[in-house]
């Protein structure tokens, strides 16, 4: 995500941690989609830039960004991390603090269904070969190897769709 929230990040140019990445468009879907893989098999999917999902190599959700809010896996739920801007002072210019709130079971189910709709739509588009790659950093100029397998793993996950909580930075 761009450091300045209003800036749109160029993921093909700037997301260097994603060693393979493509930007594509699907038929009948106006969003620009970027799919990328880390060397360890983790996958990131950006639909425009909101929502964004990051999955572990087994297709479990680690973190995401949806409707302007950050989320991360937290045990058996997601934690919503909301940015609160602190008035600037000379000592602390532009300070931002994150407030954490765990999702209720109902909120988690709603989130999961929205995520599954996005991933299912993407999987259908790629399975039907109804897409065009506009740019990319891949070995063959095609989808990164294993993209469809990853989408299928994500969609096959049931109650265990969340990764263990990521280590704090």
Image: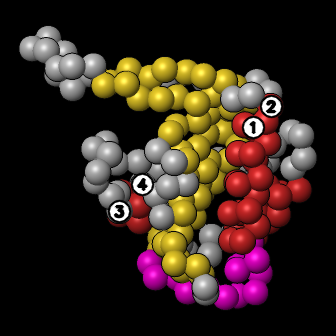
What residue is at 55 percent from the left and 47 percent from the top? 66
Q: Where is residue 131 shown, x and y percent of the image? A: 61, 85
Residue at numbered disc 2: 105
Examine the image and state in which quarter residue 7 appears.
Answer: bottom left
Q: Secondary structure at mark 4?
A: loop
Residue 16: which numbered mark, if any?
4
Examine the image and state in which quarter residue 27 appears.
Answer: bottom right
Q: Residues within 10 Å of mark 3 (few under 14, many from 20)?
A: few
Residue at numbered disc 3: 10
Q: Is residue 91 left or right of residue 124?
A: left
Reading the chain from its start, which is encountered first: label 1 or label 4?
A: 4
Of badges 1 and 4, the one in the foreground is 1
In front here: 154 or 137?
154
Specify start and end residues of the magenta stretch as a single range: 123-135
Of badges 1 and 3, the one in the foreground is 1
Q: Secondary structure at mark 2?
A: helix
**Cα distance in 3D space between marks 2 and 1:** 5 Å
Q: Secondary structure at mark 3?
A: loop
Reading the chain from its start, which is encountered first: label 2 or label 3?
A: 3
Q: Secondary structure at mark 1?
A: helix
Residue at numbered disc 1: 108
Residue 97: which numbered mark, if any?
none
Q: Is residue 119 left or right of residue 167?
A: right
**Cα distance in 3D space between marks 1 and 3:** 30 Å
Query: Is residue 66 on the magenta stretch?
Result: no
Of badges 2 and 4, the one in the foreground is 2
Position of residue 106 relative to residue 8, above or below, is: above
Check contact, mark 4 vs mark 3: CB within 8 A: no
Q: Residue furthest top?
A: 91
**Cα distance in 3D space between marks 2 and 3:** 35 Å
């Amino acid at each position: 995500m761009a450091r300045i929230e209003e800036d749109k990040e160029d993921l093909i140019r700037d997301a260097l941690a994603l060693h393979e990445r493509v930007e594509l468009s699907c038929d009948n879907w106006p969003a620009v989609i970027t799919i990328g893989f880390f060397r360890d098999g983790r996958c990131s999917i950006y639909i425009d830039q909101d929502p964004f999902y990051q999955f572990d190599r087994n297709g479990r959700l680690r973190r995401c960004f949806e409707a302007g809010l950050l989320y991360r896996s937290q045990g058996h739920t997601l934690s919503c991390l909301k940015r609160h801007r602190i008035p600037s002072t000379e000592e602390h210019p532009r300070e931002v603090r994150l407030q954490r709130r765990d999702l209720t079971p109902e909120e988690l189910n709603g989130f999961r269904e929205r995520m599954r709709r996005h991933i299912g739509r993407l999987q259908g588009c790629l399975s039907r070969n109804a897409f065009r790659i506009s740019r990319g950093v891949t070995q063959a100029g095609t989808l990164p190897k294993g993209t469809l397998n990853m989408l299928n793993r994500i969609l096959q996950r049931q109650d265990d769709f969340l990764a263990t909580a990521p280590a704090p930075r």
